[in-house]
Image: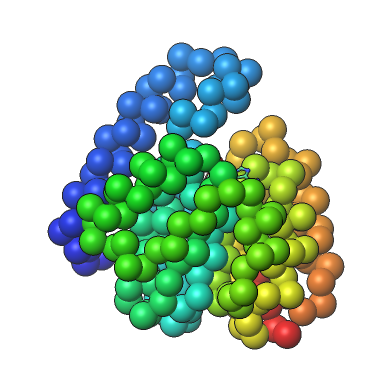
Amino acid sequence: MQLDPSFKKVLGDYDKRLDDENQLMKTLSGVDAMKRRDEFLLPVGEDAAIFMNTLIKSSKSKSILEIGTSYGYSTLWLADAARATGGKVITLENNADKINYAKDKISKAGLSNYVDFRLGDALLSIKNAKETFDFVLLDLWKELYVPCFNLFSPKLNDGAWVLGDNMTFPPISKKESEAYQNVIRTKETFTSILLPIGSGIEVSQNHS
Ligand SMILES: C[S@@+](CC[C@H](N)C(=O)[O-])C[C@H]1O[C@@H](n2cnc3c(N)ncnc32)[C@H](O)[C@@H]1O
């Protein structure tokens, strides 16, 4: 895969941080890791990122919504795809420190023109959004997947893709992930399938 040099440099920074975090994670109990989750990137991972990047480019999706920016790992890949399609990523996060970190990385990658960072509660940001969407990445705390879906589904364009991360990992969020899968799979306008990429992605397409 051909990558822009600035993109590659920023990706290397994330990978280094991720290696360090993985070492630290190994020393923490599940409970402690959960308590300290805001310190970690919690990224979709490279396989899922490459899949999303390719899907956006091949479907020529322009209006991209990311729900759960964290420190911007996935945003970087979505923004690279948006540059290729002439589109824009709207990314939602309620933690200001994370948004600031992500903004700096996106700027260093030369991708600031392709990202609109919206700080605040995702539910409110979705409700207030005037845009309609071709592609949605759902990747915030899992109990919010269904409430978010209910808010953004009327704003999806025909043919829009919706990707829900963490369907199979971590096991702690299995109940919420399954609840989301049940909701989207019972909507007649969606075709949906679980792909074993990264932490398990529910890939759904809207045919409205
Ligand atoms: C799993 S992380 C996102 C990881 C990111 N997509 C990536 O791959 O790099 C989930 C993020 O959702 C954010 N979040 C959780 N609840 C939120 C809410 N109600 N509104 C906005 N952001 C929220 C958390 O602060 C956290 O940074």
User: Picture quarter containing residue 16?
Assistant: top left
**Residue 95 appears left or right of 184:** left
Residue drawn 68% across the image and 75% down it: 155
Residue drawn 74% across the image and 44% down it: 143
Q: Quadrant of the N terminus?
A: bottom left
Q: How many marks?
A: 0
Nearer to me, 37 or 131: 131
**Residue 43 appears left or right of 148:** left
- Asked if residue 36 is positioned above or below residue 159 in the image, the reply reads above
- Asked if residue 129 is positioned above or below residue 61 in the image, the reply reads above
- Asked if residue 96 is positioned above or below residue 81 in the image, the reply reads above
Nearer to me, 18 or 167: 18
Nearer to me, 159 or 1: 159
State how the image is colored: rainbow
Estimate the x, y position of residue 182 in percent, counting from the top left.
81, 58
User: Picture quarter containing residue 130?
Assistant: bottom right
**Residue 88 appears left or right of 190:** left
**Residue 8 appears left or right of 189:** left
Residue drawn 63% across the image and 18% down it: 31
Estimate the x, y position of residue 113 in percent, counting from the top left.
32, 68
